[in-house]
Image (cartoon, grey):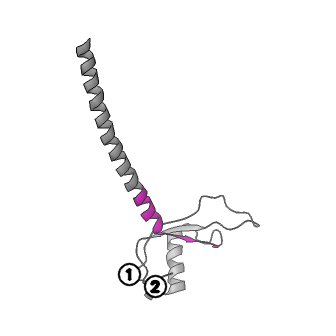
Amino acid sequence: LEETMGEHKEQLTSIAAELGVMRDAQRRLQEKVEGLENRSRRQNLRIVRLLEGREGADAGSHVVWMFEKLLGEEAFERPLEVDRAHSTLMRKPQDNEPLRAMVVWLCSHLKWTL
């Protein structure tokens, strides 16, 4: 009986040490995920007060056209590429409600700071 208790105690000690290692790994991974999410969000542009439906079926092309029209093509080091462009996840507003924002993630950078 004492021998079995000793074996169980060793197993519990081993499991506790392994749990500590796993907790450290989980904490490091959580910090990494949070850092990646924060950096990803920093690359998002939020465009507000656009009339609903103006972008048509291809919001990305509409955003490229809009930026080139507003800033001029010389504002870009290379052709502007949009990875994602979509309206925020709110329902389509009624006539008396505020407009939804559009979230845009650009692949290329602007020379000119907005």
Q: Is residue 92 above or below residue 23?
A: below
> Residue lying farthest top?
1
- Secondary structure, mark 1, is loop
Disc on the earlier residue, 1 or 2? 1
Which percent across, then down, holds residue 90? 63, 58
Real-space Cα separation, disc 1 to disc 2, in angstroms: 13 Å
Q: Are marks 1 and 2 in contact (CB under 8 Å)?
A: no
> Residue lying farthest right?
96
Q: Nearer the viewer, residue 28 or 77?
A: 28
Q: Name the residue located 63 percent from the left edge and 68 percent from the top edge.
A: 53
Q: Name the residue located 64 percent from the left edge and 66 percent from the top edge.
A: 100
Residue type marked 1: Arg
Q: Which residue is mark 2?
A: 112
Which quadrant of the view contains residue 102?
Answer: bottom right
Which percent across, then down, holds residue 9? 28, 24
Which percent across, then down, holds residue 50? 63, 73
Residue type marked 2: Trp
Q: Name the residue located 46 percent from the left edge and 84 percent from the top edge.
A: 112
Q: Name the residue located 60 percent from the left edge and 58 percent from the top edge.
A: 89
Q: Which residue is mark 1?
A: 78
Q: Which residues are magenta?
A: 34-55
